[in-house]
Amino acid sequence: DAPGMNAVVRSVARLASFYGRKVFAIYEGYQGLVDGGERIRELDWDDTRMIIHQGGTVIGSARCAEFRERPGRLRACENLVKRGITNLICCGGDGSLTGANIFK
């Protein structure tokens, strides 16, 4: 987790909703991206009500050994393509940003 993650989730979801865009939360970080399924869920304005006061992050975070290898990143990519997700907003620490840089 990184400080302010709930505020980021709330801001992104609400701004997307305001502009009529879909936004998805990936629960449990890169592990959720690799696993797909119910770990990738659409968010709307109301889903982010009262989350900035909570500690930690409401979408969770997890390290993912599979994401470090190409086959895991390919599974993550397939899960994004299945849902029509074309952009990612990454919020976290050095590991999250390193993973995003490799994933691009």
Image (cartoon, helix red, strand yellow):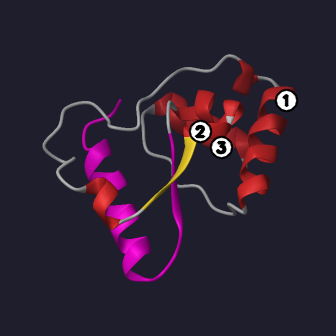
Q: Residue furthest bottom?
A: 19
Q: Secondary structure at mark 2?
A: helix
Q: Give the residues drawn in magenta, as a range.
A: 1-26
- Camera sees residue 10: no
Q: Indicate which disc, 3 or 2, sits on the residue closer to the N terminus.
A: 2
Q: Is disc 3 placed on a helix, strand or loop?
A: helix
Inspect the image, locate mark 2, and give the three-letter code of the amino acid beneath it.
Glu
Q: Which mark is residue 38?
A: 2
Q: Secondary structure at mark 1?
A: helix
- Picture layout, residue 26 above or below residue 61: below
Task: Give the camera-side residue of 85 and 8.
Answer: 85
Residue, disc 1: 70
Q: Quadrant of residue 53?
A: top left
Q: Kindly report which numbered mark, 3 or 2, lies closer to the viewer in this rendering.
A: 2
Asked whether residue 13 is in view, the answer is yes
Determine whether, in the image, residue 29 is placed left or right of residue 55. Answer: right
Question: What residue lies at 44% left-to-right and 72% top-to-bottom?
Answer: 16
Q: Give above or below for 42 relative to 58.
A: below
Q: Residue 37 location in percent, x, y?
A: 66, 38
